[in-house]
């Protein structure tokens, strides 16, 4: 959690967020279809149908909301895959090992190696959880697998020996999920009876940790636009307009910052460690950083009828 002038930033595990959204769907009595892959959509006079990979299609809907993520089959391919991804694992928080339960802790070797431990709240078991990550180039994944877990753990320990209680929880390479990142923003985020939200509209590396925030603000804006507009076309135009500027700003900021943390550059990490790092401890840099990783740069909330406590007035 980062405090700045009365604001608090809270890390929320994605499964917690999923549960909240899932419970809301159940409460509304909205039917849920699982185990079905969507392969496309088709616009007809009566509305838009969702096409299923197994064959067949849904009934026609007034609006299809594409929340299929960065590789959505409902959106045109665009953007670029990044050279660096990361191995991720969700583990128990290593209590007593000297890590700060209220901060993201990271170690770097230039920008080629990045190790991180992020507190992500309390899991269903009641135990504090941690996300552990290790940056890795996509084209080195096979080499990493071939080298085996013990060789990798030795590398991690040589850079950060306090990671022992974290590494001890990883006994199988399958516990680590390799995430590939891409930077992409759809040129057209709404089409007749179809809107792309969240990562389906815009995705980036998670360096600023804004993907889930952005997706929820997109959904909030769509809900408000639907309430206010006379027809669907207008609602989609309004929803896109409400979000476009903030999304563009964060896509741009993330593209600028990503190579500072994950790249082959020698200059950027030097500037990060020798100039930006020390300066970042001094106001107003502290405030700017806190605002950036809270998604608040560009002051997006008032235009959506929200305040920084995310209350609707
Ligand atoms: C490693 C990693 C770390 C991240 N860390 C952060 C962070 O700290 N903070 C943050 O805010 N964001 C973070 N993000 C980004 C965040 O996870 C995403 O921005 C967010 O999940 C986007 O939500 P979404 O609902 O748009 O898409 P997703 O969460 O990707 O959901 C898409 C869903 O659609 C399903 N789907 C996809 N294709 C099909 C299909 N054809 N048919 C049927 N179903 C399909 C998928 O299975 C998935 O359930 C991180 C991302 C990664 C990869």
Image: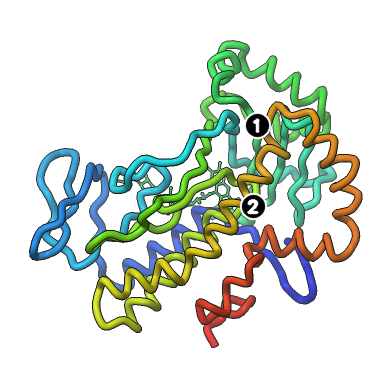
- Residue behind mark 1: 135
The mark that comes first in sequence, 2 or 1, is 1
Above/below status of 93 relative to 196: above
Above/below status of 268 relative to 187: above
- Residue behind mark 2: 253
Q: Is residue 194 left or right of residue 83?
A: left
* Location of residue 269 (image quadrant): top right
Q: Residue at x 55, y 20 (%)?
A: 139
Other residues around mark 2 within 10 Å, as few (<14) / some (14–19) / many (≥20): some
Which quarter of the rendering shows the C terminus?
bottom right
Numbered disc 1: secondary structure:
strand
Q: Is residue 112 left or right of residue 243?
A: right
Residue 52 drawn at (x, y percent): 18, 44
Which quarter of the rendering shows the N terminus?
bottom right
In the foreground, 81 or 220: 81
Identify the disc placed on residue 185. none
Q: Residue at x 15, y 56 (%)?
A: 43
Q: CA distance from mark 2 to mark 1?
A: 20 Å
Above/below status of 42 relative to 297: above
* Location of residue 13 (image quadrant): bottom right
Q: Is residue 106 visible?
A: yes
Q: Is residue 36 visible?
A: no
Q: Is residue 43 left or right of residue 157?
A: left
What is the number of callouts on the image?
2
């Amino acid at each position: 959690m980062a405090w700045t002038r009365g604001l608090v930033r809270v890390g929320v595990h994605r499964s917690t967020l999923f549960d909240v959204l899932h419970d809301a769907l159940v409460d509304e009595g909205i039917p849920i279809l699982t185990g079905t892959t969507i392969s496309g959509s088709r616009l007809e006079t009566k509305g838009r149908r969702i096409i299923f990979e197994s064959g067949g299609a849904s009934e026609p809907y007034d609006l299809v909301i594409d929340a299929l993520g960065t590789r959505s089959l409902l959106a045109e391919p665009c953007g670029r895959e990044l050279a660096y991804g990361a191995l991720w694992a969700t583990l128990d928080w290593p209590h007593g090992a000297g890590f700060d339960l209220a901060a993201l802790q990271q170690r770097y070797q230039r920008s080629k190696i990045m190790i991180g431990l992020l507190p992500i709240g309390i899991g269903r078991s009641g135990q504090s959880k941690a996300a552990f990550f290790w940056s890795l180039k996509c084209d080195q994944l096979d080499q990493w697998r071939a080298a085996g877990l013990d060789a990798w753990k030795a590398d991690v320990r040589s850079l950060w020996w306090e990671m022992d209680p974290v590494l001890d929880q990883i006994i199988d390479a399958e516990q680590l999920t390799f995430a590939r990142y891409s930077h992409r923003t759809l040129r057209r985020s709404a089409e007749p009876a179809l809107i792309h939200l969240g990562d389906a509209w815009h995705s980036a590396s998670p360096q600023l940790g804004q993907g889930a925030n952005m997706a929820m603000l997109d959904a909030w804006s769509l809900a408000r636009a639907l309430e206010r507009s006379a027809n669907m076309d207008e609602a989609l135009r309004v929803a896109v307009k409400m979000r476009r500027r903030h999304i563009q700003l964060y896509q741009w900021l993330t593209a600028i910052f990503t190579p500072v943390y994950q790249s082959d550059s020698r200059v950027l990490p030097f500037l990060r460690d020798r100039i930006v790092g020390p300066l970042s401890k001094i106001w107003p840099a502290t405030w700017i950083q806190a605002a950036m990783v809270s998604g608040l740069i560009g002051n997006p909330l008032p235009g959506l009828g929200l305040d920084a406590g995310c209350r609707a007035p």
